[in-house]
Amino acid sequence: METEFSAGSIQLWAALVVFLAAYILIFTEKLHRTISALLGAVGMVLVGTFLGFYDQEAALSAIDFGTLFLVVGMMVMVAILEGTGATQYLAIKIAQASRGRPFLLLGGLGAFTAGASAFLDNVTTMVLIAPLTISIADILDLSPLPFLTTEAAFAVMGGLATLVGDPANIIIGSGSGLGFVDFLIHLGPVAVAVWLSSLGVFLFIFRDFVRQRPKNVEKLLEIDARKALEDPVGARRMSLVLGLVILLYLSHQWLGLEPATVAMLGAAFSLVVVRPDVRRVFGEVEWSAIFFYGALFVLVGGLEHVGILHEFAVLFQKFAAGNVLVASLILLWGAGILSAVIDNVALVIALVPVLQRLAGLGLSPEHLVPLWWSLAIGAVLGGLATPIGSSATVVTISLSERTKTPIDARRWMAVGVPAWLVGLTMGTFFIVLGVLSGFFT
């Protein structure tokens, strides 16, 4: 008995040490996050193999290939759409419709960014919209900083609305079995409310800026938006493909299709109808992100096999069974705080197996479902608080270095912290309302 306990303790502590070491490396960014995750995954498999709790076959089965294929499919479609110039065309049209007025431009580009990020990767959205925003601001002799900071925040908020809007949502959807319509119905209103509330806050923060009179409005109106369309035929075809993909997402549960299947169908249709340069398209897929997610699944799988996640789930189940609302709010704010300092994907991959185990421990669906929504809201919106909280923010800050007023930590947090507070507060309101009314159960 003592030998078994001793062996189990060694396994538990070995798995925990490997896991914490990998997450510390990811958090400190001493190495690229993908390298840190891969080192952790390999270490977990080696330790698990030699100590007999986690072999190579178990590590392979721990990978959620449905999530990986969904992300790859979406990335392929985004890469093809990017090559047509369609998003740049729409952004120019929105800017021209505002006639350069800062408050309309901030709201219009923000709405476009949030809407695009609900269906496209928010990092790609910012890569496309940020340089165009800088150019428009230069033409109007306005500072691009208010536009860039609010757009990055809106990209995060937009990603909350759908299953495919943020990698964290994709992982939660795969782990919970909740579908595209479930996310749209339950989190879409949250995202819209957070966007509208944050827009009011941003207009107040930049109240002096939005009152400015822009210059060179005529030059903005003279831009021929059609020149941004590098492939007009491809843009029209991609609009049809994306329309079909959205319809399939809306009906995938009824049709019996997994979201990953829909994404890969969309990617295949896009490649067939647009006929882009395949090497360019696959070269733009964020393969480092795919390996990062896969390595994290392997890493967390080791914790699951050694029993740590089970014990944590047992403790949480005892608390959540009688206090579902309190448990949901603790999870929302806990995830919101942690996601401000660590990658939300890493956080979600670690927590999803814990929530999955709650169902096996007898927690009823009406108690479990609010926890999934709380995790999504906290993990996605938590990234708003700091410059490193979301990939979209990191990319935007990097692109802002091309301007006279690059975004530093102080400038970002002047916008990000109020947006974070508004987002989690609105999320709290919706969780309380949803649990008490039964809408979130």
Image (cartoon, helix red, strand yellow):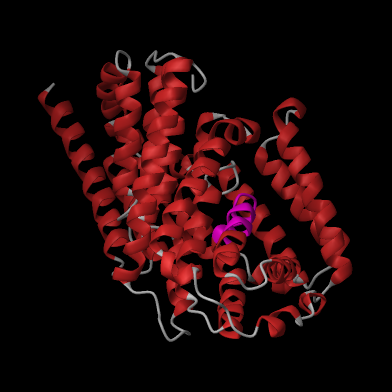
Q: Nearer the viewer, residue 72 or 159?
A: 159
Q: In this view, does 314 lie above or below 125?
A: above
276 or 437: nearer the eye?
437
Q: Residue at x 66, y 54 (%)?
A: 74
Q: Which residue shows up at 32% across the image and 63% down it? A: 414
User: Number of numbered discs present?
Assistant: 0
Residue 394 magenta:
no
* Displayed quadrant of residue 256: top right
Q: Is residue 55 visible?
A: no
Q: In this view, does 432 lie to the left or right of 78?
A: left
Residue 281, percent from left and from top: 70, 69
Q: Compared with residue 73, is residue 247 higher up or lower down, i.e. above or below?
A: above
Residue situated in front as seen by the camera: 221 or 428: 221
- Report if residue 119 lies within the magenta region: yes
Q: Position of residue 150 (x, y in %)?
A: 48, 62
**Main SS, magenta residues:** helix
Location of the N terminus by quadrant is: top left
Q: Residue at x 28, y 49 (%)?
A: 19
Asked which quadrant contains residue 230, the reply is bottom right
Snapshot quadrant of residue 81 = bottom right
Q: Image point 37% across, 58% down: which residue? A: 416
Can I make out residue 384 in this image?
A: yes
Against 160, residue 318 (above or below) is: above
Q: Which residues are drawn in magenta?
A: 110-122
In the rendered image, residue 110, in percent from the top left (x then y), is placed at 57, 59
